[in-house]
Amino acid sequence: MPDKVLIYSRFPKAMMVRIGQRFDLMDAAGKPPAEVFTAEQLSGVRALITAGGTPLGAAVLDMLPSLRAIVCYGTGYDGVDLAAAAKRKIAVGHSPAANAAAVADLAVTLMLAVTRRLLPADEFVRNGSWAAAKPSPLLRPQPGNPGRRVGVYGMGEIGRKIAARVASFETEVGYFSRSRHDVPYQYLPSLEALAEWCSVLMIAVRAGADTHHAVDAAILQRLGKDGYVVNISRGSVIDEAALVAALADNAIAGAGLDVFEKEPHAPDALTAFPNVVLTPHVGGHTIESHIAMQDCVIANLEAFFAERPLPFEVQAA
């Protein structure tokens, strides 16, 4: 009989098909498990699948007395209370680097879209302004990529792939992370120094208490009126109110965002700016990435139920 696994976050059913072929899935569909299942059903749950950004704290863990494995679908695990899990001897797994290439691709796409004013150009054609030869201030020539300074905040697997991609556009690449790496890019000693140096700030750092609102008004001020910020990591890294203020004051040139402080992101002041390109947290949303993430989830679950260490266990910082 297949082992039971609780699906804690809300996932499209298609993402769980392969996993459901190997395990007996109890789908809470993003609702509190106690609203969907009885206490008796939950008492026997030994493993669950969650999205890394979904809050999963001690109160939920207390409802699952037999839980011994939390498996995150994706790279992130910032929503999981790691201390609470460790206290209860619960292993936490994830899918490291499984979607890195796709996320890096979108980061570069956002950079090109916002720096080349792709959305205003698209609208210029669609609304007939080009055919009517109407002038457009938004389509004035902008600086190109050769010689552009791109700063990468975070040099993990995604950061490295972003750096390699933007380097092929003849840019200068610099980075800041908690430690130096053996990479062919300039290391800047702080986020402040990186923002001061670059004209495009790529955020590829893992979310956590140490990175919460790391990109604040002061960092955006250092980036300057010709600078752009691109975020494909977690919305919590940018102080969104400060970003809106910087855009309104023309303190920066624009932004490309795949993630937000609150998701899904409803239309608001941020969505009104023509120099901002927005996508709905789809950085890792490719067929190849999902297969790779599912492979990691399955491998973690199979190892757990076979009483082996998780092959993709979250490593303490």
Image (cartoon, rainbow, N blue to C red):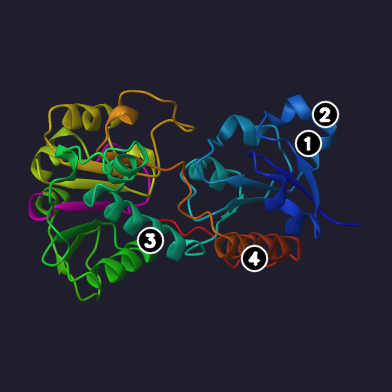
Looking at the rendered structure, the kind of residue marked 2 is: Thr
Q: Which mark is residue 42?
A: 1
Looking at the rendered structure, the kind of residue marked 3 is: Ala
**N-term mark: 2 or 3:** 2
First to last magenta residue range: 196-214
Classified by dominant secondary structure, the portion drawn in magenta counts as: loop
Badge 1 vs badge 3, beta-carbon distance below 8 Å: no
Q: Which mark is residue 38?
A: 2
Looking at the rendered structure, the kind of residue marked 4 is: Asp
Quadrant of the snapshot with the N terminus: bottom right
Q: CA distance from mark 2 to mark 3?
A: 42 Å
Could you say whether the residue bearing mark 2 is in a helix, strand or loop?
loop
Badge 2 vs badge 1, beta-carbon distance below 8 Å: yes
Residue pictured at 37% horizontal, 43% vertical: 208
Q: CA distance from mark 2 to mark 4?
A: 30 Å
**N-term mark: 4 or 3:** 3
Residue pictured at 23% horizontal, 40% vertical: 215
Count the marks: 4
Where is residue 71 shown, x and y percent of the image? 62, 52
Comparing labels 2 and 3, the label whose residue is closer to the camera:
3
Q: Is residue 250 left or right of residue 108?
A: left
